[in-house]
Amino acid sequence: MAKSDQELPEGFRQLKTQVAGHTFEESNAEAVGLLQDSKAGCVLKPLGKPECGERELRFYESLAEAGASGDNDLLALLRGHVPRFYGPLKLVVNRRERTFLRLEDLTRSYAKPCVMDVKMGKRTWDPESSPNKRKVEEAKYVMCKQKLGLCLPGFQVYLPKEEHTQETTILRHGKDYGKSLNVEGFKQTMALFFNASTSDSKSRRAGCELLLKEVLRQLQEILAWFQRQRLLHFYASSLLICYDYSRLADPPKPLINGYHQNDDDPATWVRVKMIDFAHVYPAEQGLPDENYMFGLQSLIEVVQSILHR
Ligand SMILES: Nc1ncnc2c1ncn2[C@@H]1O[C@H](COP(=O)(O)OP(=O)(O)OP(=O)(O)O)[C@@H](O)[C@H]1O
Ligand SMILES: [Mg+2]
């Protein structure tokens, strides 16, 4: 079966902007990736292996319920940093019924979606994993994971074809590329992803600066949440960084009554959200999630160094 021949329910298609994780495979009808319902502006994530899928579903459900009793406000605050959750949904894909999570599509309405999946933490195995799984995880992405507490399973970015042109080309890389990166390579890839060296025109340079500042603002908010919380530890979870390339080179819109139009708010074309909660556990001994925070702090430093270079 070719990738395009998958039997999908009407109204759904493969999520073209999926840059990492489990995907559809040509020769394996059992392998299912994320789907997109572009009319509803949501993506559908198939539940993973039974324990993982249930853990992720429970995580989203606990966030949805949080805040009602007042004693779990911190959990309610986390809702702002993850995709909105619209409940589970059963769909038949390749003649088999599966359960999906309906989530806000973080790339919705983007004309030229740039997407990067950054996996967080030096330790990417959960407390229940076998000694073998630990070994396998320890051996992956060693060069930047152990130093930065970050690794790069995949990304896609639009880049200008040549200097001073409107034409673009798209660059996509998966986990093999991420595994080849050392710290310097990781930093260079981040700069490439943010179009920091290809921003030749004045307006694109300004756009790139806006982008980096907005990414930093959202990263700092997530860090502030982690500094307060002692509830959860996140293993093998990612940050999804998304922006719309077409807005980088957009000339500034005229002010209306002294205000920029609403869609000029960079938060509409830049989104940094936490995803992938198949390995979220209650915090051990009520401790903060130092593992996640270490990665987050180094990500903030990398973005700052691109902004200030
Ligand atoms: N809410 C979302 N909006 C847009 N794209 C998403 C969203 N969630 C996931 N994606 C895309 O799908 C990819 C894989 O997602 P995710 O990490 O949740 O799945 P996975 O790694 O296959 O999951 P698991 O580890 O639970 O098996 C991401 O890298 C991203 O490209
Ligand atoms: Mg993932």
Image (cartoon, rainbow, N blue to C red):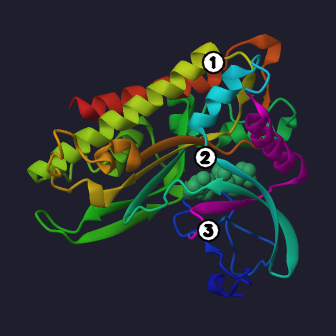
Q: Is mark 3 within 8 Å of ligand 1?
A: no
Please, what secondary structure does the residue beneath circle 3 have?
Answer: strand
- Whole-percent x, y for residue 269 in the image: 38, 50
In this rendering, which labeled residue sits more in front, label 3 or label 1? Answer: 3
Q: Image check: 164 left or right of 167? A: left
Q: Position of residue 29 (x, y in %)?
A: 79, 78
Residue 290 lies left or right of residue 300; in this view the side is right
Q: Mark 2 sits on what residue?
A: 83
Between the C-alphas of marks 3 and 1, the distance is 34 Å
**Tag of residue 53:** none
Residue 233 relative to residue 218: left or right: right
Whether the residue carrying mark 2 lies under 8 Å from ligand 1 is answered with yes
Does the magenta portion include 171? no
Determine whether label 3 and label 2 are within 8 Å by CB: no
* Residue carrying label 3: 36
Which numbered tag is attached to residue 290?
A: 1
